[in-house]
Image (cartoon, grey):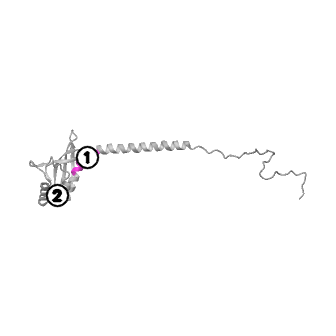
């Protein structure tokens, strides 16, 4: 191999060029990683807001749901009562009646008396084919209510007035002027 003195020689591979001497023991460090602290703070705030919003919604649904049931509860119970009568499920229908406070002609209304009477009316006038609340009113005490039901049986429609009383969270029928 021929060395031309006019040509500069290149330094061996791995050594710095341009005449910078290597620093003994120096190991180049990778650039520092960017902090993701802002991301975690943002996610924490967003997550907290979601939890608060869900909690607020749950409370609102509970409060408004209870209030709506308190306002429409008597009509709902009266409708369920007549659905049971329409299905001739007298045990279920009787469950909507307050056995301690309900009476017919001054006599306490037992399940047997109720079932016998309902079956007799079904035989005489026909089975209930439809029933819907035509009006309802909750008294100022918020414990008693009256529901007027438009009942159809045997092709004839008539109105039955039901008096209800709130017992705990449930509305119970305490008086009816018909079945």
The x, y position of residue 75, in whole percent, is 23, 48
| Mark closer to the observer (1, 2) | 1
Reading the image, the residue beneath label 1 is 72
Q: Is residue 130 visible?
A: no
How much space separates mark 1 and mark 2, taking CA atoms? 25 Å
Q: Which mark is residue 174?
A: none
The x, y position of residue 53, in whole percent, is 41, 43
Secondary structure, magenta segment, majority class: helix
Q: Which residues are magenta?
A: 68-78
Asked if residue 81 is among those painted magenta in the image, a careful observer would answer no
Residue at coordinates 29% horizontally, 44% vertically from top-left?
Answer: 66
Residue at coordinates 12% horizontally, 57% vertically from top-left?
Answer: 116
Mark 1 / mark 2, whichever is N-terminal = 1
- Position of residue 58 in the picture relative to residue 9 (left or right): left
Q: Secondary structure at mark 1?
A: helix
Closest to the observer: 57 or 162?
57
Reading the image, the residue beneath label 2 is 153
**Residue 142 occupies quadrant:** top left
Q: Secondary structure at mark 2?
A: strand
Q: Is residue 84 visible?
A: yes
**Residue 129 occupies quadrant:** bottom left
């Amino acid at each position: 191999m021929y060395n031309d003195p006019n040509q500069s020689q290149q330094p061996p591979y791995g050594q710095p060029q341009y005449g910078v001497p290597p620093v003994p023991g120096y190991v180049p460090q990778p650039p520092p990683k960017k902090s993701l602290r802002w991301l975690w703070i943002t996610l924490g705030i967003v997550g907290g807001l979601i939890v608060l919003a869900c909690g607020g919604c749950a409370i609102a649904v509970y409060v408004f749901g209870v209030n709506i049931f308190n306002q429409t509860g008597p009509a709902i119970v009266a409708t369920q009562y007549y659905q049971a009568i329409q299905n001739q499920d007298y045990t279920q229908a009787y469950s909507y009646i307050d056995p301690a406070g309900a009476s017919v002609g001054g006599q306490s209304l037992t399940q047997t008396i109720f079932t016998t009477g309902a079956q007799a009316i079904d035989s005489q006038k026909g089975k209930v084919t439809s029933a819907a609340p035509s009006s309802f009113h909750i008294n100022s005490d918020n414990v008693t209510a009256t529901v007027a039901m438009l009942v159809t049986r045997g092709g004839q429609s008539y109105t039955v007035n039901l008096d209800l009383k709130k017992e705990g969270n449930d509305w119970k029928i305490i008086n009816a002027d018909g079945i």
